[in-house]
Amino acid sequence: MLKEKNKVTCFNRLNLKSLLVLFMVVAIPLSANSAPGHHELVTGYESFLGSSTSTGQTKTFSLTAAVTQLSIGSGKPISVWAYNEQIPGPILRVNKGDRVKVLFQNNLPESSTIHWHGIRVPNNMDGVPNLTQAPVEPGESFTYEFQAVDSGTYWFHPHSRTHEQLERGLYGILIVEDPEHNQVQGQQYDQEWVWVLDDWLLDSDGAIDDSFAIGDLDAGGRLGNLLSINGKELPSYQAKTGERIRLRIINVSNARNYKLDFGPAKTSIFAVDGNISAQAQNVATFDITPGNRIDVDLTIPASLNSANAETLIKVNNLFSHREASGDVPNGVQTLATIKVLGKVNIQKDFPVPSHDKLPDWDNAHNTPIDFSFEFDSRINFNFLWTDNPLTSYVINGKTYGEHEVTTLKKGEFYHLRFTNGTGLYHPIHMHGVFYKVLSRNGVKVNEPYFRDTALLDYNSSIEIGVVPLDVGSWVMHCHMLEHAALGMMTVFDVIE
Ligand code: C2O
Ligand code: CU
């Protein structure tokens, strides 16, 4: 009682000066809360990435790109373009901290390069022709070399006439294991599956439809009429009840989005674009847009098979493309089946992997927008007498080549806004960085992970936060490869 009374008296005696001091003490943390300082955003991101100490090991691989005969789906062999005569190309598996050395030989009829999608590499290893390196001409070779600083599921593909080279079959997988992390959580999975999702547009002879000329490209992107996982149509996998499978999914399609449904199986996405997530989510809640990877903890429930008979799980794609036309599969598409027979001896019950250092970017959406990018289309009325296509796809009104370079400073936080002026999907991919989606259509979201590609839906906007850490010229583009081919790409210069 006495204490409280004293407090009141004390308060009454406050003069203007102490009120002012009191106000400042309260006001400073309040404003920091509504718009965090750039410094804390940057240090939070850096500790999320962690450091990567060298293992002292170098892993060397050879990749030869060439025209090859392979069967796609279940048909007869057709002419494809492939790395090391296989589709998908090889899985390059290394440990975090290893040096990766890739001897690339180009035996294609045209120039090419290799881009390491998602993982941070030195700028001159990024594989963008005429920006970070000279194109590798037919018959020539180039050695890529970098330290694997990020663990997770990555992939690689050409960055020269990508819409055609990738579509003809040039892509492969880069897996960076984190031995430290695996000891705790990863190695205990019963199985690991790698699923590369692709759709193929085949003509009536079963060959790859060759409408790759700029004038032939479909505004909605190239949706295929044959869906495949690892180049196979409707593959069948085997599992036991109670089994836990680490499933790495990579969407290499030119334009098709996926939203997967595993029926009665339990799915938890625990990594997005290589980055471990702070909180797992069901696979059917995630739009896997071209370029995206997800790592899924797939559990076959013990209750599934009490009668001990074979059960079939259908894996369906539920993503429906609003602009799809003609005979391409749309609506519910079955991609694979999982045959469940028998049960595991011991059911693993370790926790789903999660990241405990996701930076607190909860209020980052309150920082001012530094740069805005409008993704749009443009009619070229001069298409009759110039080389321009009838429609270009543009960022802030400019195609790649006309673009203005955006300069960013290394180690600074940036708030970027992407808006979609078209009735088409645009998966936005940035090279050299991971970014975090802060809001969609002006509504704050708190995705518990960083990513390198996000789907910008029809007539919508997203805002992202990003901290570039590597100096150089990096592109940002639509990963719907027809749009990129028609101009939807720009450049960020990251400077000291
Ligand atoms: Cu997957 Cu610029 O690329
Ligand atoms: Cu696009």
Image (spheres, rainbow, N blue to C red):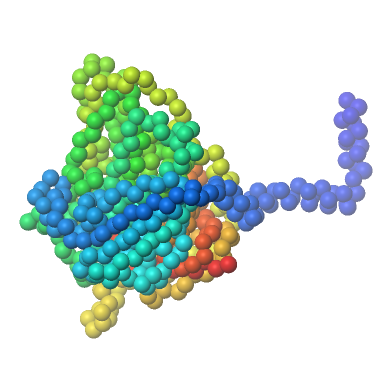
Residue 218: x and y in percent read 23, 63
Give the residue furthest to the top.
307
Residue 176: x and y in percent read 41, 46
Q: Is residue 337 left or right of residue 393?
A: left
Give the residue furthest to the left.
205
Q: Is residue 486 visible?
A: no
Residue 49: x and y in percent read 53, 49
Using the rendered view, name the quadrant where residue 270 is placed: top left
Q: In this view, does 230 lie to the left or right of 452?
A: left
Please state which of residues 5 and 92 is positioned toward the viewer in this rendering: 92
- What residue is shown at x 58% (from left), y 67% (from top)? 496
Q: Where does the N terminus fall, quadrant-wise? A: top right
Please state which of residues 445 and 433 is positioned toward the viewer in this rendering: 433
- What residue is shown at x 92% (from left), y 43% (from top)? 13
Position of 163 relative to 72 (above/below):
below
- What residue is shown at x 33% (from left), y 36% (from top)? 192
Using the rendered view, name the quadrant where residue 11 is placed: top right
- What residue is shown at x 31% (from left), y 61% (from top)? 104
Residue 173: x and y in percent read 33, 50
Position of 197 relative to 142 (above/below):
above
Using the rendered view, name the quadrant where residue 339 is placed: top left
Please state which of residues 166 and 490 is positioned toward the viewer in this rendering: 166
Please state which of residues 305 and 4 is positioned toward the viewer in this rendering: 305
Q: Can residue 371 be seen in this view?
A: yes
The mark total stands at 0
Position of 326 relative to 390 (above/below):
above
